[in-house]
Amino acid sequence: MKIQDAYVIVTSPGRNFVTLKIVTESGTYGIGDATLNGREMAVVAYLEEHVIPLLIGRDAGRIEDTWHYLYRGAYWRRGPVTMAAIGAVDLALWDIKAKAADMPLYQLLGGRSRERVMTYAHCTGSDIDACLEEVDTHVKLGYRAVRVQAGVPGIATIYGVAKRAGERYEPADSELPAEHVWSTEKYLNHVPKLFAAVRERFGDDIHVLHDVHHRLTPIEAARLGKAVEPYHLFWLEDCVPAENQQSLKLVREHTTTPLAIGEVFNSIHDCRELIENQWIDYIRTPLSHGGGITHVRRIADLASLYHVRTGFHGPTDLSPVCLGAAIHFDTWVPNFGIQEHMPHEAITDRVFPHDYRFEDGHFLVGETPGHGVDIDEALAAKYPYKRASLPVNRLEDGTLWHW
Ligand SMILES: O=C(O)C(=O)C[C@H](O)[C@H](O)CO
Ligand SMILES: [Mg+2]
């Protein structure tokens, strides 16, 4: 089954998405998500200039060989742009293979390990009470797990907290980066009160998660992990940046709060030390940014040896193509933990028709051959790309910080 054509579709139904479509001689096609939030056009150029010409005429069935051809063949290895481009090719090729086999993707991966995929919701509020109302709403929608983020007195704007009640936060909300001001001390003094309030109102039965978004140093993260132990979080996410993997060792030595990390990783080498030393509990690298199913499956297998489970990144800035493929992977992978769910806007869902369903706090995988997500190209063409940037953060003295 030779690849006859491949092209990139850039569309902005509510926010920017980049999709790679690969078409074979028989007419069977597959699609992959190539969206890299805030750096979308870099992946477009990488695909159009350096990848698509190599795909034409190749055997679409040789997924493993194509992965190595693109990875080793480029000489310049790893990095989010390269790996998002390879990931899009890989997802599209798995889609084609599953369609050709007339199977839903999870069957091709090895079949079901579970009936349904537990997912967590985002609950944010300008203060603790507003956040608790969001938790209440999501518990009533059936969620068993909630990620809670609340405003902190004395900090005007925090990335990840919606600006208005009932709204979701938008990851990339302005043409050029907005600037926020951050105070670690104010945050550390306030945030344990949020978990205490959630447990007091909702009891012990819901899973509670929290994203620190890389803003702490290791010893500060250790302090937070210890402080929140009484509220038994499901996980504390991205508590420190992890370019230095040893940072997680320090945190681990001080606290039993479970640790999740990896949404900005794109290679097994970014997390190998973290996994082999059992410094983390959940690995979050998504299929699209981690070089596709072919590579992330290796990460999951390594993780399974060390009691580390998957908890894939699932924000709105990964398209329904990535989410749909993730739900197949989650249905199969033996060491599944949880799947993030930040619902896409209705118009995004119309541009990307899909067969996965949310029910009772879980995703249910579809039975359509392939990964079950398509793109309506005519509708997509109505929503042209708009530059959108993620924010930056500064400490109160003006020092540039993690956001
Ligand atoms: O979903 C999360 O956990 C995030 O941290 C969202 C990220 O900030 C977002 O995907 C950046 O583009
Ligand atoms: Mg995160």
Image (spheres, rainbow, N blue to C red):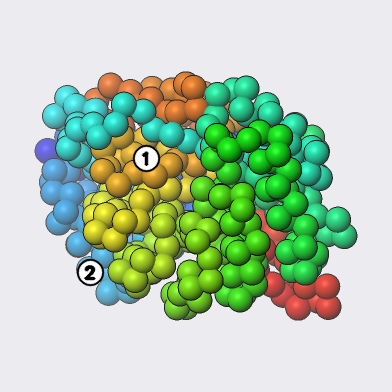
| Placement of the C terminus among the 4 image quadrants | bottom right
| Placement of the N terminus among the 4 image quadrants | top left
In the rendering, which numbered label is found on residue 71?
Answer: none
CA gap, disc 2 and disc 1: 25 Å
* Of callouts 2 and 1, the N-terminal one: 2
Q: Residue shown at 14%/56% (left/top)?
A: 65
Front residue of this view, candidates 250 and 55: 250
In the rendering, which numbered label is found on residue 326?
Answer: 1
Residue under label 2, please give it.
Answer: 72
| Residue 234 visible in the snapshot | yes
Indicate if the residue with disc 1 has its beta carbon within 8 Å of ligand 1. no
Could you tell me which secondary element the residue under label 2 belongs to? Answer: helix
| Neighbourhood count class around disc 2 (C-alpha, 10 Å): few under 14, some 14–19, many 20 upward | few
Three-letter residue code for mark 2? Arg
Front residue of this view, candidates 172 and 60: 172
Q: Residue shown at 60%/64% (left/top)?
A: 226
Residue 205's spot in the image, x, y percent? 55, 34
Q: Residue shown at 42%/28% (left/top)?
A: 363
- Single out the residue that lies furthest toward the front: 230
Q: Residue shown at 17%/25% (left/top)?
A: 102
Three-letter residue code for mark 1? Ala
Could you tell me which secondary element the residue under label 1 belongs to? Answer: helix
Indicate if the residue with disc 2 has its beta carbon within 8 Å of ligand 1. no
| Neighbourhood count class around disc 1 (C-alpha, 10 Å): few under 14, some 14–19, many 20 upward | many
Looking at the image, residue 389 lies above or below residue 342: below
Residue 402's spot in the image, x, y percent? 65, 68
